[in-house]
Amino acid sequence: MKKTAAEPRRQIDFSRARRGAVVQPQPGKTKISIRLDNEVLEHFRAVVEQAGGGNYQSLINDALRAYIQQKSVVHATRDVVKEELSRSFEATLRRVLREEAAPYRVGKARSR
């Protein structure tokens, strides 16, 4: 094997260097470290590969956003249904009580 000479040490000027990320993050995004199951990563990477390219992290972000929106729609729908059912139940209960109490004339004096 042929030995190669080591590259001479270069003098690099760091006087104008700045600390921090080389690439500035997009506004509204935060870099985090997260542990995901291998199956989850493999799924999203496969989807990106089948699509012919892209970013699997963006795909995960979109899936999480869709889940949040779906949950908020479900909660809003559930609240509307609860309110409608309670109104309907109250009206039905009042009607039944009136019908059941009518023969007894509750609250009124009986005539003989």
Image: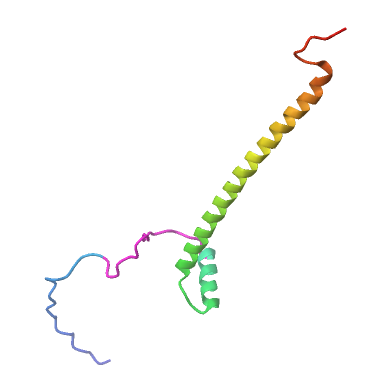
Q: Is residue 77 left or right of residue 96?
A: left
The image quadrant that residue 100 belongs to is top right
The boundaries of the magenta stretch are 21-38
Kindly identify the residue that appears in the image at 66 percent across and 40 percent down.
84
Residue at the image point whose x is 60% and y is 43% from the top: 79
Q: Is residue 74 left or right of residue 88?
A: left
Is the residue 63 above or below the residue 1 in the image? above
**Residue 53 x, y percent position in the rendering:** 48, 77
Locate the C terminus by quadrant: top right
7 to 66, vertically: above or below? below
- Which quadrant holds the N terminus? bottom left
Q: Is residue 55 magenta?
A: no
Taking the image as shown, residue 50 lies to the left or right of residue 9, namely right
Q: Is residue 110 above or below residue 95?
A: above
Q: Position of residue 57 (x, y in %)?
A: 45, 67
Number of numbered discs on residues: 0
Indicate the position of residue 44 as horizontal and vertical percent values.
52, 68
Residue closer to the observer: 12 or 82: 82
Q: Residue furthest top?
A: 112
In the picture, measured across the screen, residue 6 lies left or right of residue 100, that is left
Q: Is residue 37 magenta?
A: yes
Q: Position of residue 105 (x, y in %)?
A: 80, 16
Residue 80 higher or lower than 111, as above or below: below
Write the residue at 21% across / 89% down: 4
Q: Residue at x 14, y 84 (%)?
A: 8
